[in-house]
Amino acid sequence: MVAKSGSQYDAAYARVGLLIYLHEGTSRATISRIGGLARSTVGHQVDKLIEIGLIEERFSQSDGPGRPARGLHVRADAGYVAGVDLETGGARLALANLKGTIVEEIVLKLSIEDEPSKVLTRICDTISQMRGGLDLACLKQTVIGIPAPVDFARGRPVRPPMMTRWDDFPVRDFAQQILGSPVTVENDTNLAAIAESTQQHAYLPLVFLKVASGIGVGIISSDGQVFRGYDGAAGDIGHVQILAQDDRVCRCGKSGCLEAVASITAILDELEIATSDTTIDHAEQLQALLRVGDKRAFQAVHSAARQIGSVASGIIQILNPRMLVVGGAYPEIHDELLSGIRSVVYERAMPLSTRDLILTPSRLGPRAEICGAIELACQQIWSVEMLPTLVESFNHIKPNTACV
C-alpha cells in the first residue's frame, strides 16, 4: 500500500524507516547523507517514528574522549513477524521481532492432504498462542511457504501435485482474515533461496536446488530479486521429463519426471523403504544405510544425483549463476547427492558457465525455508511500499507499548 498524497506517511517517511532498518545503529546525519534527504526532513520523520514506538534513539559506547554518538535502532519489542514452512508431514512456525531475530519456533505434525481451511486454521491458531498468547495487534506480517507453485500476486497455490485440495485456494485471504494483518504466500524453495542469498559470503545470481520429497529450484537474480516466472512456475524442475521410456508415474500424472526417478521418495521406493506423509522420518533409514556403507543405497543415491545433475547443468548453462546451493536432504544423503551432482555439472556444462561457479551445500539445512520466510516478512514490512501500513498499524496499540 502506498500512502496517499498529503498523508503524514509519505515517501520520505517510508524511506527514512527503511534506511534505519538497513543501517541499524546509524545516526540521523548518516541517514540524511545516505538517503539524500534534508536533515530537517530526517529529523522530523525520525521523531514521528520514535513517538509511535517503532524506533528508539540511544547513546552508543564511546572509545574516545568525545561525546558518545546517538544511534537509531529498531525497537525489538515493537512487534512481531511470523513465518510458516508447510511441508508434506508437518509445518515449522517461527515468530521473530521486527529486526528479524527469531524468538520462538514450533514444529507441528499435520497432513497437507487435509482440507486447507483445517490446516490453515490450526496454523493460525498456533501462531496466536505463541509467546504465551500473542496480541494479534502486535503481529505485523506473516509469510507462508508451501511446496507448490504459487500465484504470488493472488496468494494462491497453482495446480500443486502434492496438495490436490489446495489448487487455487485463497491461502493469503483466509489467513489474513484470522490473523488480522498482512499475509504473503510464497513457494518454499524460493524462501530457501532468499535465506541462502542473505548469508555471509553468498554471491549473486544464486540458484538454490532443493532435493526432498519433491525437487525444485529457487532463483535469485543479480539485484537480489526472486525470479518467479509469469505464473509462479519458474524453478519447478521436478516435472522435467528425463527418461521418456520410464514407466514410473509422477504425482503430476506423467511418467519419467525427474521427481519420479530422483527425489528422496523415489530413492526410498527403489530401496523398498516404505514411505508415507512423513517421508522425512523414513529418510532417516536411508541415512543410516549410507552411514554403514550399504552398496544398494549408495548406488541409488548416485544414480539419482546424476539425473539431477543433468538437469542442473542445463539450468547453469541457461542462467549462469555465480552460486549453486544444494539443500533439502539429510547430511549423509546430501553429501552423496552433492558429490554426484557436482561431477555431472562440471562434465556437461560449458567451461564459461562453470569457471567461477561456487557449488556448495546449504548453510541453513532444514531451517532454510523458515529463515527465508522471516527474511521475506521483514523485507516486506520495511519496504518503501509497505512501511506506511506498518506505521498505520501502530494506531491500534498504545504508543510505545511493548509487545512481549
Image: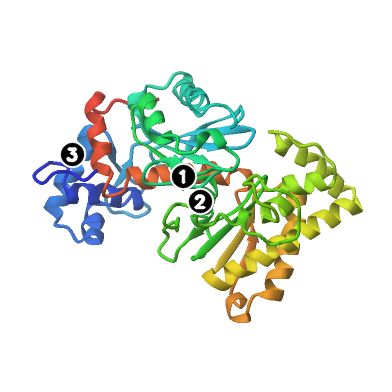
| 10 Å crowding of disc 2: few (<14), some (14-19), many (20+) | many
- The residue shown at (54%, 54%) is 196
Q: Is residue 320 visible?
A: no
Q: Name which residue lies at 37% across and 42% down.
A: 154
Q: Position of residue 220 (x, y in %)?
A: 48, 60
Residue at numbered disc 1? 186
Image coordinates of residue 312 in percent, x first then y, are 63, 65
Inspect the image, locate mark 1, and give the three-letter code of the amino acid beneath it.
Answer: Glu
Q: Which residue is mark 2?
A: 190
Dot 3 or dot 2, earlier in sequence = 3
SS type, badge 2: helix
Q: Nearer the viewer, residue 28 or 171?
A: 171
Disc 2 vs disc 1: Cβ atoms closer than 8 Å? yes
Q: How far across and down, in percent of the image, does residue 259 sit? A: 67, 52
CA gap between label 3 and label 2 equals 35 Å
- Residue 265 got which mark? none
Q: Which mark is residue 48?
A: 3
